[in-house]
Image (spheres, rainbow, N blue to C red):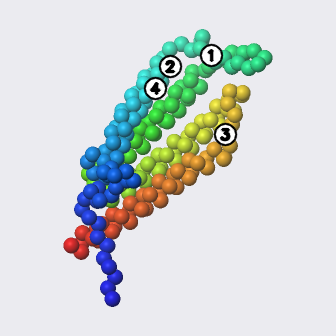
Amino acid sequence: MRAPSFRLPPRLGSRLRIGLPGLRALGPGSVSSLLKTALDISYGLLIFLTLLTCLAFAVVAVIPMDQVGLTVTSDSGGTRIPLPRAHALFGIGAFIGYFGGFALILRHLRRIFRTLTLGDPFHPDNVSRLKQVGYILAIVTGGVWLGQSLVSRLVRGVMDPPSLFNLVTPAFSVLVVFVLAEVFREGARLRRESELTI
């Protein structure tokens, strides 16, 4: 007895539907195309914020920093702490890395959602795109954790040092992205096999 062969339809978007009647998950005019539009707007905003923080970095690198400082307030009063140029550049550089990292993530997600809008979710390039999203997410979240640890040690009382527990949710998110990449790899493999049997 021969095992049944698995065949993916060429336009999967016309068959997949979300719980609401008439609302498709894939293809033109679907939820995927709506989410891609939202990702396009968010990507543009993050690129703008990245460029703005790069401009702030360049300005702070050349302006005099003698009169610049931080004021930390508490119940007993306030304390003025001088802000060295190196600390200011470190903080702005951290924001550049944060905004730039998430802009890269959105760049890959936009390309994935473009294939979903075309009704081709198991495009072979989506596997590497998802893996790159996972790597960037791991680097950004690890960088944020290290940055918070440094700030909490350099300027006492401004923020509590982060614990390792703060990395649990980001680490879980990174693992989910890598599992999804493997799911997409298997879908792409099944699609290739089905194309070869036609």
* Crowding at mark 2 (Cα within 10 Å: few <14, some 14-19, many 20+): some
Q: Position of residue 73 (x, y in %)?
A: 70, 18
Q: Which residue is mark 2?
A: 60
Q: Which element carries disc 1, helix, strand or loop?
A: strand
Amino acid beneath label 1: Gly
Q: Which element carries disc 4, helix, strand or loop?
A: helix
Amino acid beneath label 2: Val
Which of pointers 1 and 2 lies earlier in the amino acid sequence?
Answer: 2
| Residue shown at the point (34%, 55%) measured from the top left | 17
Q: Which residue is mark 1?
A: 69
Mark nearer the viewer, 3 or 1: 3
Residue 9: mark: none
| Residue shown at the point (56%, 47%) measured from the top left | 170
Q: Which element carries disc 2, helix, strand or loop?
A: helix
**How far is the residue under mark 3 from the one under mark 1?**
24 Å
Is 158 left, or right, of 137 in this rendering? right
| Residue shown at the point (33%, 58%) measured from the top left | 16
Which of pointers 4 and 2 lies earlier in the amino acid sequence?
Answer: 4
Q: Which element carries disc 3, helix, strand or loop?
A: loop
Amino acid beneath label 4: Thr
Q: Is residue 36 visible?
A: no
Which of pointers 4 and 3 lies earlier in the amino acid sequence?
Answer: 4
Which of pointers 1 and 4 lies earlier in the amino acid sequence?
Answer: 4
Q: Is residue 133 visible?
A: yes
Q: Position of residue 32 (x, y in %)?
A: 34, 47
Q: Which residue is mark 3?
A: 162
Q: Which residue is mark 4?
A: 53
